[in-house]
């Protein structure tokens, strides 16, 4: 099987790693990939999605897997399917669950799926009046795609109004913020739950927990994610059942009934308040860095899972996961998430410890190959992933690996998985 992976980050590298160990896969292409994906396959530069679809036809690609949200919202799946290609991901209409927060919130409201109270608007005066009646803190979200950064948690009403003004004016997030969602703040803990769906059938993956804040103890600004782990012990059978019955199953059913069957990865960002799940957001692809810790847990060949979901035949495959834990620690560049950093050469020590080599690996993200050397050129540079029989063991391997990687300005959180370990 020849597989094309669309994207360039750590998520796509991790999907590539899973496909690399898959006996069904003979060749992997990345579009555009990064400076390290060339170790797994071949990087492809194309002008647009039509061009990429033509490439897939020419090279006999059997399956395309889309990593990021932007191509899905752009309609890459529709383009590929019109040309008779098999592609894993939702259509452009189904991708609106992530493409528009207003669409998402109204979908939740329409189908009585639990979420925070909210207002959608493009009018500042209406927003300001709504904010005045709310309790602090207050959540303000840009409607469109903002690479995971379009959410402001305002501690005071004045801060919330300022955030709304900056979004509506286009100053904060351009056109993505020209409409906003203002919603009540839910006080609990976050979980990431992923379901693979073929439009009718679905399978729920082990729940993960992301760490969005830049610094330890969840301090500092929000980022794209500074680390993750799975499965999380912060969820039990009862909570899994609530999430499936109240959220996942109704979502898949409602999308199908509305004429937009959801095929691909449904990522439900949840807030758990007093053991009750509420939807914070939907995403229509694997999270990053959650994908980096889910792929090592997947026992079923990745190509089989993606292919069956893309062809409406998920019920015919037995999806299995290893009985172990995975922890991922993001190493970020010096100025992340505030501004770009200067390119920095990455030096990786030779791993002589057999157990570390067996239980840890790197998923590369913001890296480029310059004159034969690997450089950190992105915000989130790479993810050190550890696996183990216990969460503590997986965490220890991940942090041991961070000590083997060096580049100027390297920074990372030292407390990934702290909530789960503290609760034990």
Image (cartoon, grey):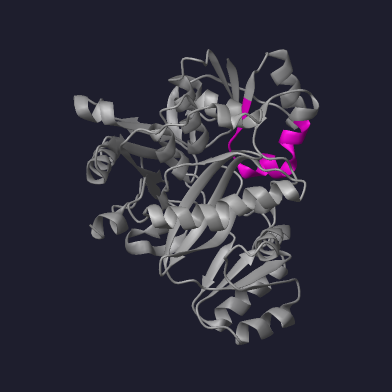
- Front one among 364 and 358: 358
Residue that extends furthest to the right in the rendered view of this protein: 82
Q: Write the start and end of the magenta stretch as one range.
A: 64-79
Q: Is residue 417 left or right of residue 143?
A: left
Q: Could you tell me residue 402's position as x and y percent?
A: 29, 40
Q: Number of numbered discs present? A: 0
Q: Residue at x 57, y 83 (%)?
A: 134
| Quarter that holds the C terminus | bottom left
| Quarter that holds the N terminus | top right
Q: Residue at x 65, y 62 (%)?
A: 108
Q: Is residue 12 left or right of residue 227?
A: right
Q: Could you tell me residue 375's position as x and y percent?
A: 44, 33
- Front one among 336 and 43: 43
Q: Could you tell me residue 66's position as x and y percent?
A: 62, 34
- Could one spot residue 359 in this view of the protein? yes
- Main secondary structure along the magenta-highlighted residues: helix
Q: Residue at x 76, y 29 (%)?
A: 81
Residue 235 vs 52, above or below: the answer is: below
- Front one among 27 and 368: 27
- Could one spot residue 32 in this view of the protein? no
Q: Is residue 401 left or right of residue 314?
A: left
Q: Is residue 27 magenta?
A: no
- Location of residue 159 (image quadrant): bottom right
Q: Could you tell me residue 21's position as x and y percent?
A: 43, 20
Q: Is residue 75 magenta?
A: yes
């Amino acid at each position: 099987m020849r597989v094309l992976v669309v994207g360039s980050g750590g998520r796509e590298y991790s999907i590539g790693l899973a496909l690399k160990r898959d006996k069904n896969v003979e060749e992997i292409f990345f579009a555009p990939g990064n400076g390290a994906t060339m170790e797994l396959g071949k990087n492809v530069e194309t002008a647009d999605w039509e061009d990429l679809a033509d490439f897939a036809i020419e090279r006999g690609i059997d399956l395309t897997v889309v990593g990021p949200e932007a191509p899905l919202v752009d309609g890459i799946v529709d383009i590929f399917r019109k040309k008779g290609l098999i592609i894993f991901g939702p259509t452009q209409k189904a991708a609106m669950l992530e493409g528009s927060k207003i669409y998402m919130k109204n979908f939740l409201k329409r189908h009585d799926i639990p979420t925070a109270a909210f207002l959608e608007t493009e009018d500042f005066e209406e927003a300001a009046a709504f904010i005045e009646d709310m309790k602090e803190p207050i959540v303000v979200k840009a409607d469109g795609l903002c690479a995971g950064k379009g959410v402001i948690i305002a501690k005071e009403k004045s801060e919330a109004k300022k955030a709304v003004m900056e979004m509506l004016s286009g100053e904060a997030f351009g056109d993505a913020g020209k409409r906003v969602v203002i919603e009540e703040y839910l006080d609990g803990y976050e979980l990431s739950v992923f379901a693979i769906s073929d439009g009718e059938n679905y399978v729920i993956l082990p729940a993960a927990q992301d760490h969005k804040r830049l610094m330890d103890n969840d301090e500092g600004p929000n980022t794209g994610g500074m680390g993750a782990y799975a499965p999380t012990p912060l969820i039990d059978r009862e909570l899994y059942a609530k999430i499936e019955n109240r959220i996942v199953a109704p979502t898949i059913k409602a999308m199908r009934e509305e004429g937009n069957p959801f095929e691909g990865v449904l990522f439900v960002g949840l807030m758990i308040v007093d053991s009750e799940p509420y939807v914070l957001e939907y995403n229509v692809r694997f999270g990053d860095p959650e994908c980096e810790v889910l792929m090592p847990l997947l026992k079923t060949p990745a190509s089989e899972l993606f292919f069956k979901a893309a062809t409406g035949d998920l019920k015919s495959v037995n999806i299995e996961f290893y009985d172990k834990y995975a922890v991922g620690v993001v190493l970020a560049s010096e100025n992340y998430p505030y501004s770009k950093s200067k390119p920095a050469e990455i030096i990786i020590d030779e791993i002589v410890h057999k157990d570390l080599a067996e239980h840890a690996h790197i998923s590369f993200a913001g890296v480029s190959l310059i004159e034969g050397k690997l450089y950190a050129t992105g915000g989130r540079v790479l993810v050190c992933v550890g696996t183990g029989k216990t969460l503590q063991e997986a965490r220890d391997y991940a942090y041991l690996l961070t000590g083997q990687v060096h580049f100027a300005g390297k920074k990372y959180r030292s407390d990934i998985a702290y909530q789960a370990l503290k609760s034990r």
